[in-house]
Image: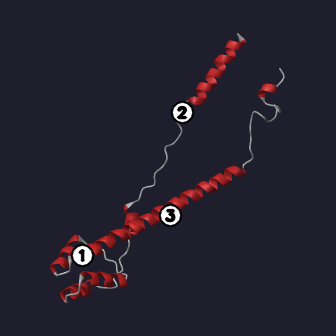
Amino acid sequence: MRTLMLCVTSLALLCGCATNHPAAEAPKISRITPEELERLQPVPAPNLPLDEIVRMSRAGATPDLIIAAIRDSHSGYALTASQMIELARQGVDGKVLDHIQATQEQAMRDAFAEEFNQRERACHEKIKALQLEVMRWPYYDPFWSYPYPYGPYWRRW
């Protein structure tokens, strides 16, 4: 009888340990708000104005020479589709427009990657801080502490 009662109790305890806790919360996902998205997009710095690019194109400069001038001036452009079409109508070569679009997209990718890296570093710092905090807590095992100095199974009946 005593053995049966011990088996039923241990089975109930094992089943209780195996169940999922409904209070466990799902991990929170931090989303980028539209304001943050606007802040992340790079601000163009056109040191070489668009009028100069149009003037160089009309003067007969090669697309590679114009692209080199854009690179040397460290210019960045945030052009809309209508602005790109207008530049094409004014005689700017498609290769130059492709380069402007590619640098705009690359600048946006770099800004997103930097933001994600900053968030990842902040998350890792929080995890490390929590790990250090947990390590500072004294270890407590209820089975090996007072009133059972030798564990629950060594207790005298």
Q: Quadrant of the C terminus?
A: top right
Q: Position of residue 124 (x, y in %)?
A: 56, 57
| Secondary structure state at the residue bearing disc 2 | loop
Image disc number at residue 118: 3
In this picture, residue 49 sits left or right of residue 140: left
Sequence-wise, which precedes: disc 1 or disc 3?
A: 1
Question: At 72% from the left edge and 52% from the top edge, which residue is drawn?
Answer: 136
Image disc number at residue 95: 1
In this picture, residue 56 sits left or right of residue 128: left
Q: Position of residue 93 (x, y in %)?
A: 20, 78
Q: Position of residue 46 (x, y in %)?
A: 33, 82
Which sits in the foreground, 4 or 146? 4
Question: At 24% from the left edge and 86% from the top edge, which residue is drawn?
Answer: 51
| Secondary structure state at the residue bearing disc 3 | helix
Q: Amino acid at mark 2?
A: Asn
Q: What is the C-alpha distance between the residues marked 3 and 2?
A: 34 Å
Which is in the foreground here, disc 1 or disc 3?
Answer: 1
Which is in the foreground here, disc 2 or disc 1?
Answer: 1
